[in-house]
Image: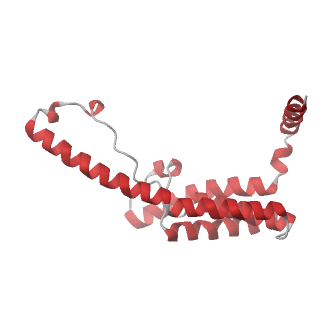
Amino acid sequence: MWYTTSTSLFMKGCLQMEIFSNIPLMTALFAVFFAQFIKIPILFLVTRQLDWKIFTSTGGMPSSHSAAVTALTTAVGIEYGVDSTIFAVAVMFAVITMYDATGIRFQAGQQAITINKMRNDLNLFMQETRAWADKNEDQKIEELKTLLGHKPSEVFVGALTGIAIAFVFQLFV
């Protein structure tokens, strides 16, 4: 009974588009898209390469994970107060997410770089001993993704981005 009632209430709320009036949620979603988009011109300024694929990839400056969780936390703090339980939950969620982005995910990216180098060395060896060069690109394995996590500076700038977006949202909404 509870499941059916909860499901129908959720569907009713979604149908009425009440979810779009959830300012903390909309702020966090905007922060993700903004942080992902701004990576393109930042990368262009640094490398002079225009790479649209970075919009849908992880890693890079600024951290969209940090922007999202800090925008959410800031918006929750503004809407419900910094003494609320939901703000405490949001803060802990943000801290864990940013810690993971700089620690575990960054180290996984570093390991992927090493593994890719080892695999490239092995491929070079195989090329010299076999007809590896005769194989087409479809037969070769795609490299592991090396841009998984963030440097602390990327997380910090992402966090500042999220906080700024939350305050701007509150001014205009």
Question: In the visual, does 53 lie left or right of 31?
Answer: left
Q: Give percent across and percent down for residue 16.
A: 88, 38
Judging depth in this view, the residue of 64 and 46 nearest the camera is 64
Q: Give percent across and percent down for residue 101.
A: 54, 60
> Which image quarter: residue 172?
bottom right
Q: Residue at x 79, y 64 (%)?
A: 87
> Which image quarter: residue 79?
bottom right
Question: In the visual, does 73 lie left or right of 154?
Answer: right
Q: Residue at x 37, y 45 (%)?
A: 144
Q: Residue at x 85, y 70 (%)?
A: 83
Q: Give percent across and percent down for residue 141.
A: 31, 36
Residue lying furthest left: 129
Figure disc tally = 0
Judging depth in this view, the residue of 91 and 171 nearest the camera is 91
**Residue 52 visible in image:** yes
Q: Give percent across and percent down for residue 142.
A: 34, 39
